């Protein structure tokens, strides 16, 4: 147990030092479920150790949120309180860093009317436009990381008693975070970041016009990339040069597709957990970038609500490459949490593209980004497409075909 506490302190320090590269005098907004109070206190300590000006903790509780979505008066889902608008925009405007501790039952919102999420998201769009843009364009640093809670652990390890399931999920998460208890996780992360950056540079050198995905699930998809696209890896940078990692752990190298340049069929390789609901066995038919058909064996109504959130939600915003043979994938655990599952597999996202995926994108307005072929939406939902037999062939502007993935892994 003593060893576990040391590992958790190392995890908290890793989030502050590598996840956010928190600066002296910077404010930190920390959101956390009440169930994670013990770990959250460690993060607060690590932040003050790093010279944080103030840590503002915003507590929430999954079960209370569930009751709200089930039982609150219907009118509230079309409103966004003014004080919350001021709260988010104030901290975005002073350049505060944000750390989200994520931990919840994957099926927390089972049975909730999907329309209530759609309306709540739409009601938040205008009030949060400024704060959202500052986050999407990497103007302010942010990081999401997860810790176990019993309702989640029991879903991941259904055959185990609660205590054992929690232990196993902790072990798995600490492995993905490269924490072994020797105090050297920060160094291991620096090495890991170097490898991701090396592959990112190779992809940028090829400057592909398009990528062609095929596998035995039935995926046969061609993805065109914008002319001035850029591949990115972890380690986004604010305009002031504060390098942060938006998702910890991370194994991906990603870019944006050309909004109208995707055609074919794509099958999901893993279930997707969206707003506390499991969607499984699904595929999309895509024409000129738009999802024209979507089918799911489980949770189809939630999937349909997700892609109908706004116009851009039925177009794609991210193309991410993750080797089948990598740290999270090799654990062979279905986490029912996108943070982990997306880093086990190649994935795509429908919804908004990241401005950093285009040259000069961080300084462009949402309208300019769209003119350069990037998709805009208030949606951004990753889903996993990578399999052990996934093949990806890149085509360059002079017509050369280059194998990028063979049998689920990078060729370089
Ligand atoms: Zn991604
Ligand atoms: Zn994504």
Image (tube, rainbow, N blue to C red):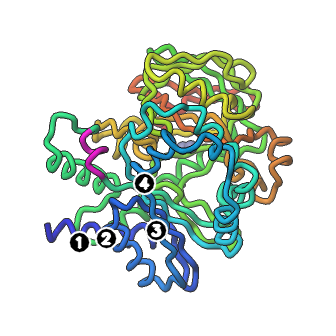
Stretch of the chain drawn in magenta: 149-154
**Crowd class of label 1 (few under 14; some 14 to 19; many from 20; radius 10 Å):** some
Please, which residue is most extreme toward the front here?
73
Q: Is residue 227 left or right of residue 324?
A: right
Q: Label 3 to label 2, Cα distance in Å?
A: 11 Å
Tag in front: 2 or 4: 4
Q: Label 3 to label 1, Cα distance in Å?
A: 17 Å
Q: Main secondary structure of the magenta part?
A: helix
Decide which of 118, 257 is in the foreground and name it.
118
Decide which of 138, 187 is in the foreground and name it.
138
Q: Secondary structure at mark 3?
A: helix
Q: Label 2 to label 1, Cα distance in Å?
A: 6 Å
Residue where numbered disc 4 is placed:
102
Q: Secondary structure at mark 1?
A: helix
Q: Are marks 3 and 4 in contact (CB under 8 Å)?
A: no
Residue where numbered disc 2 is placed:
10
Q: Label 3 to label 4, Cα distance in Å?
A: 18 Å
Q: Is residue 37 above or below residue 321?
A: below
Residue where numbered disc 3 is placed:
18
Q: Label 2 to label 4, Cα distance in Å?
A: 18 Å
Which percent across, then down, holds residue 350?
62, 34
Which percent across, then down, holds residue 278?
42, 30
Which percent across, then down, holds residue 384?
48, 32
Residue where numbered disc 1 is placed:
6
């Amino acid at each position: 147990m003593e060893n576990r506490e040391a590992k958790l302190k190392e995890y908290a320090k890793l989030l502050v030092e590598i996840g956010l590269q928190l600066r002296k005098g910077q404010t930190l907004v920390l959101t956390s479920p009440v169930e994670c109070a013990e770990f959250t206190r460690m993060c607060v300590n690590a932040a003050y150790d790093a010279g944080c000006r103030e840590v503002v903790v915003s507590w929430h509780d999954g079960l209370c949120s569930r009751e709200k979505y089930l039982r609150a008066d219907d009118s509230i889902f079309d409103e966004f309180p003014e004080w919350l608008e001021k709260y988010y925009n104030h901290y975005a405007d002073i350049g505060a860093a944000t750390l989200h501790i994520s931990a919840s039952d994957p099926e927390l919102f089972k049975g909730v009317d999907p329309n209530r999420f759609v309306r709540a998201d739409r009601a938040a769009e205008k009030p949060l436009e400024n704060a959202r843009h500052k986050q999407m364009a990497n103007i302010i640093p942010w990081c999401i990381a997860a810790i176990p809670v019993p309702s989640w652990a029991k879903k991941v390890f259904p055959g185990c008693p609660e205590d054992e399931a929690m232990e196993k999920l902790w072990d798995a998460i600490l492995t993905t975070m490269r924490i072994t208890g020797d105090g050297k996780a920060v160094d291991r992360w620096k090495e890991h970041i170097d490898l991701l950056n090396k592959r990112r540079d190779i992809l940028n050198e090829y400057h592909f016009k398009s990528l062609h995905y095929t596998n035995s699930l039935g995926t046969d998809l061609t993805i065109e990339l914008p002319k001035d696209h850029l591949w990115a890896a972890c380690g986004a940078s604010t305009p002031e040069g504060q390098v942060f990692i938006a998702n910890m752990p991370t194994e991906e190298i990603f870019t944006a597709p050309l909004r109208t340049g995707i055609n074919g069929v794509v099958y999901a390789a893993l279930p997707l957990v969206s707003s506390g609901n499991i969607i499984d066995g699904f595929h999309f038919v895509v024409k000129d970038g738009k999802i024209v058909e979507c089918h799911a064996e489980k949770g189809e109504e939630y999937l349909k609500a997700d892609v109908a959130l706004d116009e851009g939600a039925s177009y794609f915003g991210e193309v991410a490459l993750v080797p089948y043979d990598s740290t999270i994938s090799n654990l062979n655990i279905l986490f029912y949490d996108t943070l982990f599952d997306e880093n086990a597999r190649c994935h795509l996202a429908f919804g908004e593209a990241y401005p950093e995926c285009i040259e000069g994108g961080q300084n462009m307005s949402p309208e300019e980004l769209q003119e350069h072929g990037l998709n805009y939406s208030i949606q951004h939902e990753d889903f996993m497409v990578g399999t052990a037999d996934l093949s990806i062939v890149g085509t360059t502007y002079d017509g050369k075909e280059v194998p990028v993935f063979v049998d689920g892994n990078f060729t370089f």
